[in-house]
Image (cartoon, rainbow, N blue to C red):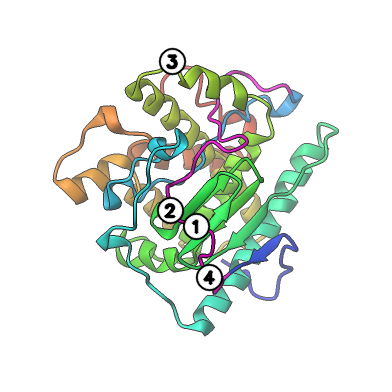
Amino acid sequence: MKWRGRERSSNIEDRRGQRRGGLGGLGGLGRSGGIRIPTGGRGSRGGISGLIGIVVVLGIIWFATGQNPLDMLSGGSGGAPSANATSRQLPAEGQDELADFVGVVVKETEDLWSAQFAAIGEDYPEPTVVLFTDAVNTACGAADSSVGPFYCPGDSKVYIDLSFYDQLHRQFGAPGDFAQAYVLAHEVGHHIQNLTGVLPEFNQARQSMSLEEANAWSVRVELQADCYAGVWANYAGQENLLDRGDIEEALNAANQIGDDTLQRRMQGFAVPKTFNHGTSAQRQAWFERGYQSGNPGDCDTFSGNV
């Protein structure tokens, strides 16, 4: 990705190196003030009516840690980081370069979504991206690095420990700067979903859903965020930011973090009723759909089969 020398977002909050003060037992992300998942109903913003829903965590760490993101959504105990989630500190120089990279990618997402919202006469409330080390306090509760990058609707912030990118490369086999950009664009996609006003509806409906039903809706939410990441990749191409192989890097990342691939890697078999992010094939297909179209209105994962 051609990112060097480009403008960085001003919405980066750098908490790296801060102590864990006040995190207590790291009980996981609770409901505080608005952890919600969508109904999948239509939004109310005209041309962005396909922008539906929200999920809080990327969740690709579930099968590496045994920690179900839906448990965190319902206030369940997150527990301490697993042996697989030990701190993977990058050299300071590498961290600073990644921080610059994140700032540039976030700025490019701001440009895309500001234009999309302006096209329907709306302002785009930009999210803040928080860089942290090991653990962090959020409006959705306390979290540590083992949950991976996540979005908190309670404060409209994306949270990421930059050491995750090393894990993405080494543990999940998804190297490359555009794989990293895909992760960010996916989380910003959850922010777009948060702006549609359908969150309280699903949060209420979820209370009467079985875990299997909630997982099925979560899959649709996550696939839509993948599609929005593809829409951003289309925009990056129009801005001449793509290098040869960038889209392949994103598609490989989507493949590596599919529920079926992760489960087979970690436990040797897959259990479809527990999927909550989508299969590798689904994640690739919806990212590519957004990339080929460039139209967020084509990202309606709530109508028909996914």
Who is closer to the viewer here, 154 or 250? 154
Q: Say which residue label 3 marks.
A: 208
Residue 3 % position (x, y): 63, 69
Q: Are marks 4 and 3 in contact (CB under 8 Å)?
A: no
Q: Are marks 2 and 4 in contact (CB under 8 Å)?
A: no
Pick whichever of labels 4 and 3 is earlier in the sequence. 4
Range covered by the magenta-colored residues: 16-44
Give me the C-alpha separation between circle 3 and circle 1.
Answer: 30 Å
Q: Are marks 2 and 1 in contact (CB under 8 Å)?
A: yes
Q: Residue at x 57, y 30 (%)?
A: 53
Give me the C-alpha separation between circle 4 and circle 3.
Answer: 39 Å
Name which residue type carries label 3: Ser
Q: Give the structural element (helix, strand or loop) at label 3.
A: loop
Pick whichever of labels 3 and 1 is earlier in the sequence. 1
Label 4 Cα crowd, 10 Å radius (few <14 / some 14-19 / many 20+): few
Residue 19: give its label: 4
Give me the C-alpha separation between circle 1 and circle 4.
Answer: 9 Å
Depicted 295 relative to depicted 111: above or below: above
Q: Nearer the viewer, mark 2 or mark 3?
A: 2
Secondary structure that dominates the magenta span: loop
Q: Say which residue label 1 marks.
A: 23
Name which residue type carries label 4: Arg
Pick whichever of labels 2 and 3 is earlier in the sequence. 2
Q: Say which residue label 2 marks.
A: 26
Quarter of the view holding residue 145? bottom left
